[in-house]
Image: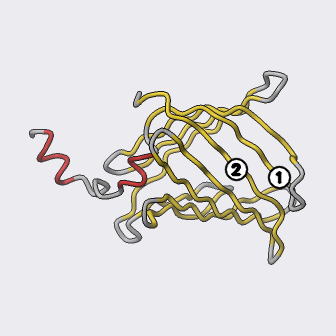
C-alpha cells in the first residue's frame, strides 16, 4: 500500500490541532492557587505523536532539586466522538479538536475525591501553550499554565 493511500484512509488525518502538538517540546509548568500564588513550578519536556488510531503523550516534569515525575499515556481514537477516549482506573474523559486547539475534559480520582480538569492546548509557530482549570464539585481549586517551545519533530 502506498503511503498516500494509507494517509487517505487514516481517520485522524483531519485532526490538525492534534498534529500541531506532535514532536518534542521543552518549557515551564507552573501550577497556581486561585489567588494567583505559585503552588509549584517545574521544567517540562514532552513528546506527542498522532497515529491513525491513537494519540500518544509523554511528559517529564523536573523540580528544582532534579526530581522527575514521568507521565506517559496513549489514548484510542473514537469515530463516534471524532476524538480520543481517556479511560483508565483513575481518569475518565475525552480529548477533541475545537477550532485550532485541542481540548481535554476529564475526571480524575484523587485522594481528596473526584477532580474535574478542563485543558486547552494551542500551538502557534514554535510555541505551545496549555492551560488547565481544576475544580471539585462546583468550586474551582486552581489552574496550571504550561509554555513550551518546539525542539524537533522526533
- In the rendering, at what x and y percent does residue 145 appear? 70, 50
Residue extending furthest toward the bottom: 138
| Towards the viewer: 99 or 13 | 99
Instruction: Tell me the quadrant of the picture where the N terminus can be found.
Output: top left
Q: Residues within 10 Å of mark 2 (few under 14, many from 20)?
A: some
| Towards the viewer: 114 or 124 | 124
Residue that mark 1 sits on = 32
Q: Are marks 1 and 2 in contact (CB under 8 Å)?
A: yes
Type of colouring: secondary structure
Q: Residues within 10 Å of mark 1 (few under 14, many from 20)?
A: some
Q: Is residue 1 above or below residue 100?
A: above
| Towards the viewer: 88 or 33 | 33
Query: With 78 as the anchor, is 131 left or right in this view?
Result: right
Number of labelled discs? 2
- In the rendering, at what x and y percent does residue 84 appear? 45, 59
Label 1, label 2: how far apart the Cα atoms are = 8 Å
Q: Residue at x 41, y 70 (%)?
A: 81
Label 2 residue SS: strand
| Towards the viewer: 14 or 89 | 14
Instruction: Tell me the quadrant of the picture where the C terminus can be found.
Output: top left
Q: Residue at x 61, y 37 (%)?
A: 59
Residue that mark 2 sits on = 145
- In the rendering, at what x and y percent does residue 49 appear? 42, 40
Query: With 55 as the anchor, is 30 left or right in this view?
Result: right
Q: Which mark is residue 136?
A: none
Q: Residue at x 42, y 54 (%)?
A: 17
Amino acid at each position: 500500500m502506498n503511503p498516500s493511500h494509507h494517509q487517505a484512509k487514516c481517520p485522524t488525518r483531519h485532526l490538525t490541532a492534534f498534529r500541531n502538538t506532535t514532536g518534542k517540546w521543552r518549557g515551564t509548568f507552573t501550577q497556581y492557587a486561585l489567588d494567583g500564588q505559585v503552588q509549584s513550578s517545574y521544567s517540562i519536556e514532552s513528546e506527542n505523536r498522532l497515529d491513525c488510531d491513537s494519540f500518544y503523550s509523554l511528559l517529564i516534569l523536573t523540580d528544582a532539586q532534579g526530581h522527575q515525575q514521568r507521565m506517559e499515556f496513549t489514548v484510542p481514537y473514537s469515530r463516534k466522538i471524532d476524538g480520543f477516549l481517556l479511560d483508565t482506573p483513575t481518569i475518565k474523559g475525552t480529548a477533541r479538536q475545537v477550532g485550532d486547539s485541542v481540548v481535554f475534559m476529564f475526571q480524575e480520582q484523587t485522594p481528596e475525591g473526584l477532580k474535574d480538569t478542563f485543558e486547552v492546548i494551542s500551538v502557534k509557530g514554535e510555541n505551545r501553550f496549555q492551560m488547565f482549570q481544576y475544580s471539585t464539585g462546583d468550586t474551582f481549586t486552581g489552574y496550571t499554565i504550561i509554555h513550551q517551545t518546539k525542539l524537533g519533530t522526533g
